[in-house]
Every structure is written in structure tokens, then in C-alpha cells.
Image (spheres, coloured by chain):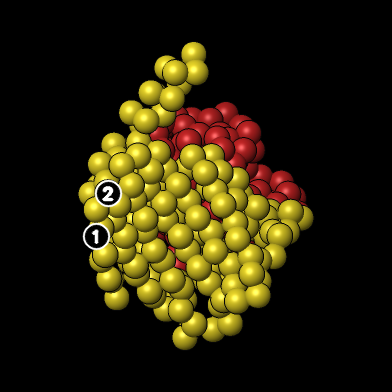
Chain colours: A red, B yellow
Amino acid sequence: MRTFYIGDDVHLEDAGPEVAILVVGGEVDYEVSPQLKARIMRAIKAGARRLILDLSDVTFIDSTAIGVLAATLEKLDETGGGSLSVVCTHEKVIQIFEITGLDSLITVYPSREDALAAAATAG
Amino acid sequence: MRSPNNTAGASASELHVLARRSELGVARKYAEDVAQAFGLDEDSRYEFVYAVNEAVTNAIRHGASDEEDMIHMSIVADSERLTFAVRDRGTFVMPEVDGAETAAGGRGLALMASLVDEVDLHIDPGGTTVRLSKVRSSSIETARARAG
């Protein structure tokens, strides 16, 4: 079992102030999804409009965490628009995105560089 | 609190935990150990553990009045099928479908149905029991071969 963690928010000067990268790892379940939500909402409140969640080290993500990602999209819509993309290569985690339909709402990238390039193009 | 009970041809065990979020990891570890002992392959184990986590999460969210309530888990395994039962004292409520976050219960049910071979929901005045069954891959392949 890998322990859940959220790294410090990453802001890249080249990417602009609206782009924020949150690095999350481990098992994201009902015990920790409130922490994930709080961190994402804090980033949005601080001005992030194009959020990149780097889930490269996430091995498990439950339905409550999927709910947090869906709520993030709603929050961005309600507050003037934005985007949420995810970096993930874990086959089973991607399968969960597919079963829940989240893959039709967010874009999943294989690397942080790919997600950043897309965010830069969108901006 | 685990209590194994092995009989000829089938095996069973139980685990009882407090209805606390912090017990989810314990429930997943229990499901993983049981699935491994049963002989599920890595993919099937992941799916089984995932479904169990959703059922236990649902029990903690909706089937307990406070963190002192208990969630009861039990396993029954025969030669082909592993069944995990999660019982709580709550009354099952159909998940809300409006709102991204409140729809999590609906997602949980959809996930359970997608990841195990059978989901059985039993509601009685004393509580709700969800049974999740996973069949050995070889059993599924055998059944498909017979059907096809």
C-alpha cells in the first residue's frame, strides 16, 4: 500500500500564473479525498484556471476522488471557465476514468511535459 | 478482528471494523490477502479490492450513524467463486445523481458492477448487505468456451 501524499503546488513562470500543477501520489480514497478537494479549491481561489493534476504516482483512486475531479470541473465552469487535465499512465487508474466517464470530461496525458504543452497552446 | 473458519471444500472468514474512514486501508488489505490466497491474478485482485473499497466506503458514508458503529465483512470461497459481503446497519438509499460530487454513490455502484462478476444488494430491517463475487478467470474462460 502506497501512502497518500500531495506535493507543494508547482507554478512555472513560463507557463503563466493561471497554470498550476498539483502532484498527488499513493492511494486516493474517501479518507483523503477531502484533502485533495481542499488543495484543488485553494489553487483555484489563488487564481489557477488551468489545473494539471500529476497522478503519475497514484495507484488507486476511488469514486469519492473521482467526484472531487468532477466537482473541480463544475467549480471552474462556475467561476469563469478553465481546464483540468491529468497526467497518468497507470492502466487501472485510467480504466476507472473510463468506467466513470471522466475520460470524456478531462484529458489524460502520459507526461507532465505533454500536459504543459497543451496548456500553453490553450493559453 | 479476524476469524477464519475453514471447512471441507469451502473457506470463510470475517472482519469487523469501526465505521471510520481510516479503516478503509485495513479493508483493502484484507480483501487483497483473501484474493491472493484464493488465487486471483493481479488484474482480478485489483478489481476485487477496488469493488470492496467502494462497498465499504458506501457502508461508512451511509450505513453508520457515527464512527462507533461497526461494519461487518465476511468472505466465502469455494473452488470457483470468491464472495465478499459488507454489512452495515443502515437503510440503503439510492444514490443521488445530481451534482458532480454527490453522484459519487452512483459511480461507486457502477464501478462495483463493472469490476466484479456479480453484485447482490440485500436490504432488510436490520441493515444492508452488499455481496461482491469474483469468479476465477479460468472459470469464466471455461464457461465462455462451453457457451461459444
Asked if the residue under mark 1 is in contact with the one under mark 2, i.e. CB atoms within 8 Å, the reply is: no
Up-down relation of residue B81 to residue B130 (above or below): above
Asked whether residue B59 appears in the rendered view, the answer is yes
Q: Is residue B132 left or right of residue A69?
A: left
Secondary-structure class at tag 1: strand
Question: Picture coordinates of residue B74 (x, y %)?
Answer: 39, 63
> Label 2, label 1: how many angstroms apart (C-alpha)?
9 Å
Three-letter amino acid code of the residue under disc 2: Gly
Residue position for label 1: B6
The residue lying toward the viewer, choosing from A63 and B92, is: B92
Crowding near pointer 1: few (<14 within 10 Å), some, many (20+)?
few
Crowding near pointer 2: few (<14 within 10 Å), some, many (20+)?
few
Picture quadrant where residue B99 is located:
bottom right
Question: Picture coordinates of residue B103 (x, y %)?
Answer: 67, 55
Three-letter amino acid code of the residue under disc 1: Asn
The residue lying toward the viewer, choosing from A4 and B142, is: B142
Q: Residue furthest top?
A: B148
Determine the chain carrying the residue at label 1.
B
Tell me which residue sits at (44%, 18%) in the image. Answer: B146
Tell me which residue sits at (29%, 37%) in the image. Answer: B41
Give the number of callouts.
Answer: 2
Residue A118's disc number: none
Picture quadrant where residue A110 is located:
top left
Q: Is residue B30 left or right of residue A48?
A: left
Tell me which residue sits at (43%, 25%) in the image. Answer: B143
Asked whether residue A44 appears in the rendered view, the answer is no
Q: Is residue B24 left or right of residue B92?
A: left
Secondary-structure class at tag 2: loop
Residue position for label 2: B9
Question: Picture coordinates of residue B102 (x, y %)?
Answer: 68, 60
Determine the chain carrying the residue at label 2.
B
Up-down relation of residue B42 to residue B63 (above or below): above
